[in-house]
């Protein structure tokens, strides 16, 4: 029982280490992974990406729209 409790506590403290922090990624990196983000990370990803749209260059914005369209077509 103690071992099980120890493992549970260890996993509870380690789980945040495996969370994806999209704020650390460049805008270009975010654009490139559109359509490849896991479902559990999708909300955070979309929020971060949308917060950057206003600061995107025209080239980035074009790529963003292109990749978003491809992503919608895959569904």
Image (cartoon, grey):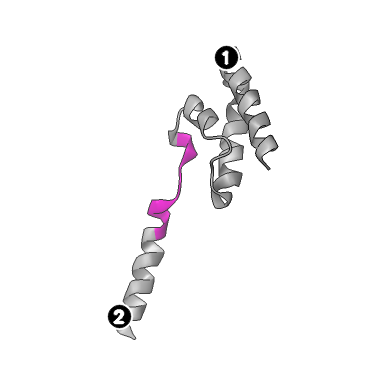
Q: Are marks 1 and 2 in contact (CB under 8 Å)?
A: no
- At 64% from the left and 35% from the top, the residue drawn is 71
Vertical relation: 51 (above or below) 5: above
User: From which residue to which does the magenta span run?
Assistant: 15-23
Pointer 1 local density, CA inside 10 Å: few below 14, some 14–19, many at least 20: few
Task: Looking at the image, tell me whether mark 1 or mark 2 is earlier in sequence order.
Answer: 2
The quadrant in which the N terminus is found is: bottom left
Pointer 2 local density, CA inside 10 Å: few below 14, some 14–19, many at least 20: few
Mark 2 sits on what residue?
3
Q: For numbered disc 1, what is the local secondary structure?
A: helix
Q: Main secondary structure of the magenta part?
A: helix
Left or right of 12, for residue 75 = right
Q: Quadrant of residue 73?
A: top right
Residue 8 in view of the camera: yes
Residue furthest to the top in view is 58
Residue closest to the eye, 74 or 17: 74
- At 58% from the left and 38% from the top, the residue drawn is 35
Left or right of 19, for residue 42 = right
- Magenta segment includes 61: no
Residue 11 is situated, as x and y percent measured from the top left of the image, at 37, 66
- At 61% from the left and 38% from the top, the residue drawn is 46
Residue 57 in view of the camera: no
Give residue 32's mark.
none
Residue 64 is situated, as x and y percent measured from the top left of the image, at 61, 25
- At 68% from the left and 43% from the top, the residue drawn is 75
Q: For numbered disc 2, what is the local secondary structure?
A: helix
Mark 1 or 2: the one toward you: 1
Vertical relation: 9 (above or below) 16: below
Residue 24 is situated, as x and y percent measured from the top left of the image, at 43, 35
Give residue 59's mark.
1
The answer for how far apart the CA atoms under marks 1 and 2 are is 54 Å
Residue 25 is situated, as x and y percent measured from the top left of the image, at 45, 32
């Amino acid at each position: 029982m103690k071992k099980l409790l120890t493992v549970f506590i260890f996993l509870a403290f380690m789980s945040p280490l495996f969370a994806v922090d999209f704020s650390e990624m460049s805008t270009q990196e975010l654009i490139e992974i559109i359509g490849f983000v896991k479902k559990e990370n999708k909300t955070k990803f979309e929020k971060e990406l949308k917060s950057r749209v206003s600061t995107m260059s025209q080239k980035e914005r074009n790529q963003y729209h292109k990749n978003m369209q491809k992503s919608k077509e895959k569904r």
